[in-house]
Image (tube, rainbow, N blue to C red):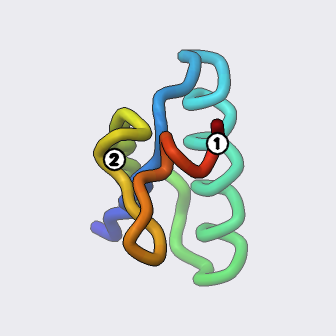
Amino acid sequence: MPVIKIDMGLTSKEVKKELIEKVTKAMSETTNIPEQHFTVIISEGDADNFGVGGVQLSEMHK
């Protein structure tokens, strides 16, 4: 059973639903594995918990 993990900032239930549907469909089409075999895990984090190039993401978006 393939597992797809997505780490991202906080987002709405609607966006997460769309991500799960579209990512699952794309992976299924690409790998020829039926959609029902995929598990999608979305981990959300506050922008204070992410850093790029040594800078907090929350600081980059000010």
Q: Please, is residue 44 above or below residue 27 in the view?
A: above
Q: Is residue 21 left or right of residue 38?
A: right
In terms of sequence position, does the residue under pointer 2 or pointer 1 come before the other?
2
Q: Residue at x 43, y 55 (%)?
A: 6
Image location (x, y in percent) of residue 16: 56, 31
Q: Residue at x 36, y 37 (%)?
A: 44
Classify residue 45 by image quadrant: top left
**Secondary structure under the numbered disc 2 in the rendered image:** strand
Q: Is residue 37 visible?
A: no
Q: Residue at x 68, y 56 (%)?
A: 25
Q: Residues within 10 Å of mark 2 (few under 14, many from 20)?
A: few
**CA gap, disc 2 to disc 1?**
26 Å
Q: Which mark is residue 46?
A: none
Q: Hey, which residue is sitting farthest bottom in the picture?
A: 31
* Circle nearer the viewer, 2 or 1: 1
Image location (x, y in percent) of residue 10: 47, 29
* Badge 1 amino acid: His
Would you name the residue on which mark 2 appears? 41
Classify residue 26 by image quadrant: bottom right
Front-lying residue, 17 or 58: 58
* Badge 2 amino acid: Ile
Classify residue 21 by image quadrant: top right
Where the C terminus falls, by quadrant?
top right
Image location (x, y in percent) of residue 15: 65, 27
Front-lying residue, 47 or 62: 62
Where the N terminus falls, by quadrant?
bottom left
Q: Residues within 10 Å of mark 1 (few under 14, many from 20)?
A: few
Image location (x, y in percent) of residue 18: 68, 33
Q: Please, is residue 55 above or below residue 14 in the view?
A: below
Would you name the residue on which mark 1 appears? 61
Q: Is residue 62 left or right of residue 7?
A: right
